[in-house]
Amino acid sequence: MRCSALLLAGLAAGWALTAVMTTSAMSAPPPNIYSPDFADARPLSSPVPRQTVRYDGPYTPGTIVISTRERRLYFVLPDHQALKYGVGVGRPGFTWSGVTVVANKREWPDWTPPSQMLLRRPDLPRHMAGGIENPLGARALYLGGTLYRIHGSNEPDTIGEAVSSGCIRMTNDDVTDLYGRASIGAKVVVEQ
């Protein structure tokens, strides 16, 4: 009888300790894995997983092909293959098409909204330093002759949607992968 009482008391103490530890763990803020200062950052994955697909199109390896209709970006690889990424594209009235090049690349870029955007949204900041709160996310590839970029996003749930002002959004994980593969001067084809 005494053993049973001790066993029950031990179990009750264990349950109480587990409840306290679980409550403490739930109330502690998680580390900011998107921070450029977080050494082992692994951003949230895309709702549209990256995959290698067959590619028989007319473009050479190293070309970036964006299908705004599909809301997908293809990075052409050798041997008739391409990496296929999910992207967010321009909302109605902000879609575009054409051929350009990657004119520049930046890690954790600063953001200065263009004057056209500030006219539509005067509530936006005039400048924002790079970091997780910045809408350009972890990396940006600047598209020559345009106001647009292929950039990361702190809103991964917008991938696969038409919500931007014309830029191409990717998850921070996917844009970091593309950033490492695409070179300055790479051809970018945007198709409707």
Image (spheres, grey):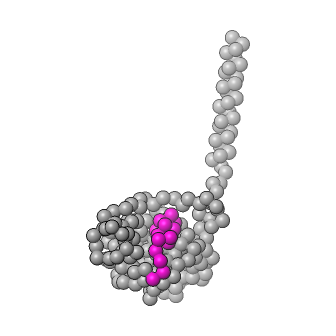
What secondary structure characterizes most of the magenta part?
helix
Q: Is residue 68 visible?
A: no
What residue range appears in magenta? 170-185
**Residue at position x 63%, y 76% from top?**
129
Query: Residue 119, how many percent across, how many down?
Result: 50, 86
Total numbered circles: 0
Q: Is residue 183 located in the magenta-colored stretch of the structure?
A: yes
Picture coordinates of residue 123, whole percent (x, y): 56, 79
**37 lies above or below 11:** below
Where in the figure is residue 105, as x and y percent of width and height?
A: 52, 78
What residue is at 55 percent from the left and 69 percent from the top?
138
Quadrant (top left/top right/bottom left/bottom right) for the C terminus: bottom left
In this rendering, position of residue 158 left or right of residue 98: right
Q: In which quadrant of the rendered view does residue 6 lie?
A: top right
Q: Is residue 85 visible?
A: yes
Q: Is residue 46 left or right of residue 97?
A: right
Position of residue 120 in the picture relative to residue 133 (left or right): left
Q: Residue at x 63, y 47 (%)?
A: 26
Q: In the picture, which quadrant includes the N terminus?
A: top right
Quarter of the image where one finds residue 127: bottom right
Between 187 and 168, the one nearer to me in the picture? 187
**Can you name the residue that lies furthest to the top here?**
1
